[in-house]
Image (cartoon, grey):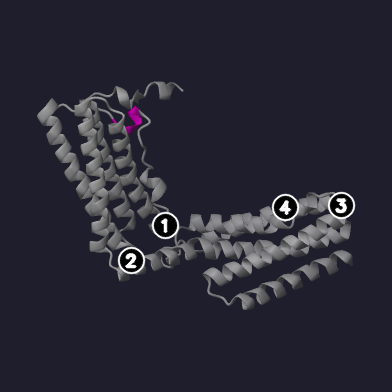
Amino acid sequence: MRFTLNRKRFKDLSEQEILALAISSEEDDAQIYRGYAESLRTEFPSSAAIFEAMAAEEDTHRNRLIALHRERFGDTIPLIRREHVSGFYTRRPVWLMENLGLDRIRSEAEAMERDAARFYTTAAMHTQDAATRALLGDLAAAEAGHERKASDLATTHLDEDTRNSEDDTAKRQFILTWVQPGLAGLMDGSVSTLAPIFAVAFATQDTWTTFLVGLAASVGAGISMGFTEAASDDGALSGRGSPIKRGFASGIMTTIGGLGHALPYLIPDFWTATITAILVVVVELWAIAWIQNKYMDTPFWRATLQVVVGGALVFAAGVLIGSG
């Protein structure tokens, strides 16, 4: 609350402070675009070129605003930034965006320009002073010009073939980093825990004991799979991406796969819990087949047959062991 009270309201800013705020904002946006360019340079050089050019445009607008400030108010520019003004639009740090996909970064850049133009336009509409209104209107027009320029740059640097190629690269990286490890984890968690969970269930017919065994098996398998995936390949040569991301994807999905049919045993009645768990297993196996079909181009019925047969054999083994 104290931080909020220490921020200045936009309507209380002087014309000089508004101009200083615009200058610092243009500077920040240029740095953000250069950060995007650097993170994309290796895999998406054409998109990196777009962001480099957009950063250069922000530099040009900043220099024009500095020249205007020098003409009206002198060389000393007040130190005022976005975080000093209540209600002013914010930017996400580059380190929050650089690990996201190409389309997400493109969308964020488009939103940056729209946010700035919308803010200046709205501020101008609520300003009574004619000079301030004119200044805000000019800034809104400048941001709208940025958005048009971004579109022109995309046309210049990204023909259809280049964009399709970059999109294919981004999709392939997503599959290698997230889908494959996650799918392996889901399969391991869903199938490998079937035998111990249902063996304990039919051996004891104690739902709470079965849940504890399922919880332990799921969490243990998740930790094991996560560390195994992370340690197996640093991604430098294989191009599979960050081992930490892959480890989290594999570990979390392994745990989810096992917990899916362990959680029903929180239901006190044995047969109600068991029937519910079996239905959950059916859903899990269908989800695995769907992911294989969607991302791995495996024919759906072949994927279903493989998963169902394997799951059924493991399930049967667990029931037989538990019943014996």
Query: Where does the C terminus fall, quadrant-wise?
Result: bottom right
Q: Disc 2 to disc 4, how far (Cα)?
A: 46 Å
- Secondary element at tag 1: loop
Q: Where does the image place residue 45, in percent across and percent down from the top left?
A: 29, 62
Mark 2 touches mark 4? (CB < 8 Å): no
- Rendered image: mark on residue 216: 4
Q: Nearer the viewer, mark 4 or mark 1?
A: 1
- Secondary element at tag 4: helix
Q: Residue at point 29% right, 41% down?
A: 117
Q: Is residue 78 visible?
A: no
* Of the image marks 3 and 2, the number of the one nearer the N terminus: 2
Q: How many marks?
A: 4
Mark 3 touches mark 4? (CB < 8 Å): no
Please tell me which residue lies in front, 69 or 245: 69
Mark 3 neighbour density, 10 Å: few (under 14) some (14–19) many (20 or more): few
Which residue is identified by label 2?
163
Q: Residue at point 33% right, 57% down?
A: 40
Q: Is residue 128 above or below residue 100?
A: above
Which residue is identified by label 1?
101
Which residue is identified by label 3?
269
